Image: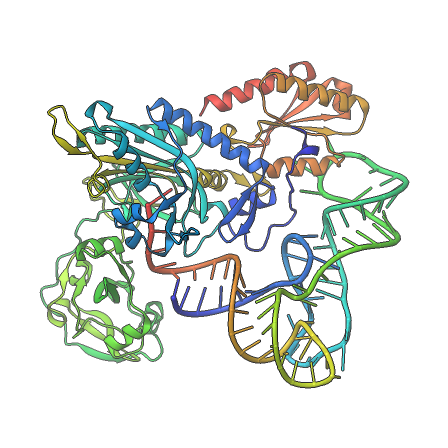
RNA sequence: CGGGGCGUAGCGCAGCCUGGUAGCGCGCCUGCUUUGGGAGCAGGAUGUCGGAGGUUCGAAUCCUCUCGCCCCGACCA
């Protein structure tokens, strides 16, 4: 490709809205442009990267025995009503009406559509197992799209669904996909980790997320430093810590804490360690108020509480509800005498002399003891795992914390969709049975963003070779006839050798071309210059590490070829 | 959904408080010079000041409403 013909509008400055590296560089380097919040156009460079990723995904899934299909993007509402997700999915599901007034869902995922396809045409155990996948645009009307391709509303996802004669076979396929995913992310050049995860809205009872490790990641994960246990903090198990305090250390005493409702401020005012504080969170679970008690320095694990309550909806109560329940301003809630079920973390039960809200504006209490002051509270593990916690799986390990970008997720679904939607087959004995299922997603566009989060420097992107838009950039640094002729000849020869070349033939100064090549992130660069012509050499530079070597013109193709082979083989 | 902020040229921003008819840098166009890390000089084009209404002789500026966008939190395959 000649750079002079390529639509790659690079920007010297990033739009103010871009906050993370991948968003900044994808925009500055001319890979994407925003059309609306969370909705992006892919320019030629961006599309080339997406195609590279898709190709790797297709190769590995085909190799693993899956078959590609393409399902519609618009699904009739009746299908989603069958699975009850029309009601349950909430406002994230974009709904549209056709000219006749019929309701449709803009597909955020395709369990219903695929089950409908399979239940119509797959009737015998002889047709199973089956694993079908598609690569398609998805739409999720996120409350808060952010960070460019990292969390868009419209994005490209690979989703796969498998159907089986029994659960054992579904678990076998789960492992098969798990292995395929590991190969895919490795080939994309990503540093990742598979972690145990909550199943969320998709449902099912076993899942792993594939997390690309990056400080800018949205997900918090913990991994044991001794064994191989790793989990999203939403899911991470904890060992029960501390014994309930048998007796109170002293009587409950009210203290004046004017205007300090935020726990950090109360800590500062009273000069007591934050571990002695009890945080009282008021939540709404399926319309009813509940209270959760945690030590001041801990975070609630919403997934754990939701599971314990058997609730489908759980969110923090609004300020008005909190004030009404505690008869105090927000920030002064305590569990004493609350007219709602109270759940306490074991660490709270272990305190004999805690500090918590007084249910009275501008007041707290000290001397709090759960057994005495809120005897009705149920004690259960409620907190989010953090670095330093003891591993729940092995004897001596402790958790370390990481940030991750979720690029893939595999689920064992069981019959969550196939049972209500009557996706059945006849077994060898002629008996009708429901097909157990699995489903498997990969965020294609998110991989592009994650790769940049993991591979960039101050000058721009450093693409892993297998997903780079081009393998090598040729920079013609000069206008001399010999320079141009040599560059042209290299462009031809590299192309003939099967290497993807971006030939910067623009009438620009060398500095501009160097800056653009770095920003766009082409892994290799060949510079053809006047000085080199005299020596019969060109310069070969690697974007990562910046190593420059002079190579004789006659050897340039072979040297580039070797570096490309090495980069692709490592994947 | 709670909190905060921003919409002025393609991008980054100033101007707004204290109303007087829009400016800077980058980019873009033309010419000359320059040519190994985002060149210099000279000339030039580009704005419904997000939208609607109001106040006023006069609104980018003040008031009301509205739309869009961003950030933090909550939530989320």
Residue A293's quadrant in the figure? bottom left
Q: Nearer the viewer, residue A45 or A379?
A: A45
Q: Give the quarter of the figure containing the N terminus of chain A.
A: top right
Q: Position of residue A566 (x, y in %)?
A: 50, 21
Q: Is residue A403 visible?
A: no
- Position of A135 relative to A535 (above/below): below
Rendered position, A398 above or below A438: below
**Can I make out residue A287 in this image?**
yes
Q: Is residue A128 above or below residue A418?
A: above
Residue at x 24%, y 26% (from the top left corner): A129
Q: Nearer the viewer, residue A80 or A448?
A: A80
Residue A519 left/right relative to A530: left
Question: Relative to A471, is A403 on the left or the right?
Answer: left
User: Which residue is found at the position 67% from the left and 24% from the top?
Assistant: A539
A281 to A1, vertically: above or below: below
Image point (28%, 64%), residue name: A296
């Amino acid at each position: 490709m000649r750079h002079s013909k390529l639509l790659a509008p690079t920007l010297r400055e990033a739009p103010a809205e871009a906050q993370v590296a991948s968003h900044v560089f994808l925009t500055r380097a001319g890979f994407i442009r925003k059309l609306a919040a969370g909705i992006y156009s892919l320019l030629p460079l961006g599309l080339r990267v997406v195609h590279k990723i898709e190709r790797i995904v297709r190769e590995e899934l085909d190799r693993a025995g899956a078959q590609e299909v393409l399902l519609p993007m618009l699904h009739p509402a009746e299908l989603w009503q069958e699975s009850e997700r029309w009601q349950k999915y909430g406002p994230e599901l974009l709904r549209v009406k056709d000219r006749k007034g019929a309701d449709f869902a803009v597909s955020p995922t395709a369990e219903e559509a695929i089950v409908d396809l399979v239940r119509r045409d797959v009737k015998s155990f002889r047709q199973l197992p089956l694993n079908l996948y598609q690569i398609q645009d998805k739409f999720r009307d996120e409350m808060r799209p952010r960070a460019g391709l990292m969390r868009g509303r419209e994005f490209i996802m690979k989703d796969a669904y498998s159907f089986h004669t029994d659960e054992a076979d579904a678990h076998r396929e789960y492992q098969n996909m798990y292995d395929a995913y590991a190969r895919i992310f490795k080939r994309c050049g990503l540093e990742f980790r598979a972690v145990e995860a909550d199943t969320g809205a998709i449902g099912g009872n076993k899942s792993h997320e594939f997390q690309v490790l990056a400080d800018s990641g949205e997900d918090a994960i913990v991994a044991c430093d001794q064994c191989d246990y790793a989990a999203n903090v939403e899911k991470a198990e904890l060992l029960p810590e501390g014994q309930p305090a048998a007796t109170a250390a002293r009587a409950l005493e009210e203290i004046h804490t004017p205007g300090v409702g935020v726990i950090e401020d109360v800590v500062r005012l009273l000069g007591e360690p934050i571990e002695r504080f009890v945080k009282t969170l008021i939540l709404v679970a399926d319309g009813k108020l509940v209270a959760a008690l945690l030590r001041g320095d801990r975070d609630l694990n919403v997934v754990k509480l939701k599971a314990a309550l058997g609730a489908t909806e759980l969110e923090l109560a609004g300020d008005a509800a909190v004030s009404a329940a505690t008869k105090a301003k927000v920030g002064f809630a305590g569990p004493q005498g609350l007219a709602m079920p109270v759940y306490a973390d074991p660490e709270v039960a272990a305190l004999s002399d805690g500090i918590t809200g007084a249910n009275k504006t501008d007041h707290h209490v000290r001397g709090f003891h759960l057994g005495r002051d809120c005897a009705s509270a149920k004690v259960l593990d409620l907190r989010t795992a953090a670095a330093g916690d003891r591993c729940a799986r092995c004897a001596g390990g402790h958790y370390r914390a990481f940030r991750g970008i979720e690029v893939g997720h595999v689920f064992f679904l069981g019959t969550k969709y196939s049972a209500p939607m009557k996706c059945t087959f006849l077994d060898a004995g002629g008996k009708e049975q429901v097909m157990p299922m699995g489903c498997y997603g990969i965020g294609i566009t998110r991989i592009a963003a994650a790769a940049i989060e993991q591979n960039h420097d101050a000058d721009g992107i450093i693409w892993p070779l297998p997903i780079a838009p081009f393998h090598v950039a040729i920079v013609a640094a000069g206008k001399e006839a010999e320079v141009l002729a040599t560059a042209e000849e290299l462009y031809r020869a590299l192309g003939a050798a099967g290497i993807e070349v971006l030939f910067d033939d623009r009438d620009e100064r060398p500095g501009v071309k160097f800056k653009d090549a770095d920003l766009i992130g082409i892994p290799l660069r060949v510079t053809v210059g006047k000085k080199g012509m005299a020596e019969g050499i060109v310069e070969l530079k690697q974007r990562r590490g910046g190593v420059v070597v002079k190579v004789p013109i006659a050897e340039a193709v072979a040297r580039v070829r070797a570096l490309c082979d090495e980069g692709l083989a490592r994947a």
